[in-house]
Amino acid sequence: MSAVPAPLPPEAPGPDLRVDLGRGLVLPNPVGLASGTAGYGFELRQLIDLDRLGALFTKGTTLRPRDGNPPPRVAEVRGGMLNSIGLHNPGVEHVAAVYAAEFTRWRVPVVVNVAGGNVDDYLGCLDRLDAAEGIAGYELNISCPNIANGLDYGRDPVAAARLVAATRARTNRHLMVKLSPNVTDIAAVARAVEDAGADSVSAVNTYVGMKIHRGIRAPVLPGRGTGGLSGPVIKPLALAAVAQVRAAVSIPVVGVGGIMDAGDAQEFLIAGANAVQVGTATFVNPAAALEVLDGLLALALRSGIGRPPGRPGGAVRAVPPAGIEPASTG
Ligand SMILES: Cc1cc2nc3c(=O)[nH]c(=O)nc-3n(C[C@H](O)[C@H](O)[C@H](O)COP(=O)(O)O)c2cc1C
């Protein structure tokens, strides 16, 4: 078992926005980078002070290296983007043997996003990663819309629970489960993974979408023609999903989907998220997550959210629960 990266020291200047997600994973602040939008952090580190952030959620990592889908793999749409990367990653061995050693030197907690096609894939990944230092926890990706069977676990509460129970029995590190919005009842899946032993959930992954090229009368993305929709266009949908999940579970909820600035992040906290992830915004502005953090810090100073500077004790929610009930449409 590796040591969890140290939280901000109590005497750090500014409001204390630490978030305790459970099982030893304490984020120094509620703003993380979403999986797949910052790789493993190496490129982004050259551009921004990654160590100020609450967490880095890595690219989805699989048992074997994957080249992903053939290009084109991304397409811009109004208000966001579609991606069909297909879990391009170097494989768990490389992540555990090479990248994790680097992570031990970083202050930002690194949560490895883990993906697979069956339970054994996930367990194989966790076994290898558990043997490495420098990893603060896992985000189980049961919601990738861009690989065959990628959504099987995310769509079926029974299958999701079976996977989470198996992984829970295998690791003592923090286990977050990334929920798919491409389901009829996201609350049912959230409840199932909580009951099976998940420490937290993140919501949401991308929505299945399509862009059509009128000239060639065909989808822009190859293969099935679909991709994962992200960016500001999904924010209202993601907020509704977070509110639904918040009402369904008592474990922490990490909100993600279309966050571009601190105001967006605040809306997710009000909807019931304990922390947030910034994804597509980083492609527009590499410093977007830091700007979200600075905005929340300024807000905390003005309105007194978080603990006053220097006050010891366990982490608190950045904003009290709003008690939002998910409304149904007519
Ligand atoms: C290019 C790209 C790659 C992604 N790869 C992953 C991934 O490997 N694993 C995962 O759980 N989510 C992945 N996501 C989903 C994001 O982590 C996030 O849930 C989603 O994009 C919504 O947030 P956003 O609107 O802020 O981007 C990816 C998203 C994008 C845009």
Image (spheres, helix red, strand yellow):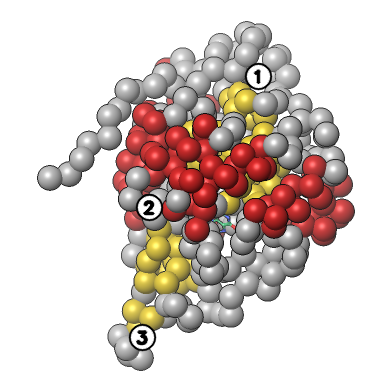
Please state which of the two labelled residues, at mark 2 or mark 1, is closer to the viewer: 2
Measure how far apart labels 2 and 1 are at the Cα level: 43 Å
- Which labelled disc corresponds to residue 178? none
Q: Confirm whether residue 38 shows in the render.
A: no
Q: Quick check: 327 left or right of 51?
A: left
Q: Is residue 146 above or below residue 175?
A: below
Residue type for callout 3: Ala
- Which labelled disc corresponds to residue 183? 2
Q: Quadrant of the N terminus?
A: top right
Q: Position of residue 154 (x, y in %)?
A: 48, 51
Dots 2, 3 in contact, CB < 8 A: no
Q: Confirm whether residue 310 shows in the render.
A: yes
- Which labelled disc corresponds to residue 13? 1
Q: Quadrant of the C terminus?
A: top left
Measure how far apart labels 2 and 3 are at the Cα level: 26 Å
Residue type for callout 1: Pro
Report the number of numbered marks: 3
Q: Quick check: 282 left or right of 5?
A: left
The answer to which of 296 and 314 lies nearer the viewer is 314
Residue behind label 2 places its C-beta within 8 angstroms of ligand 1: no
Dots 2, 1 in contact, CB < 8 A: no
Q: Position of residue 295 (x, y in %)?
A: 49, 33
Q: Looking at the image, which residue sits at the far bottom? A: 216
The residue labelled by disc 3 is 218
SS label for mark 3: strand
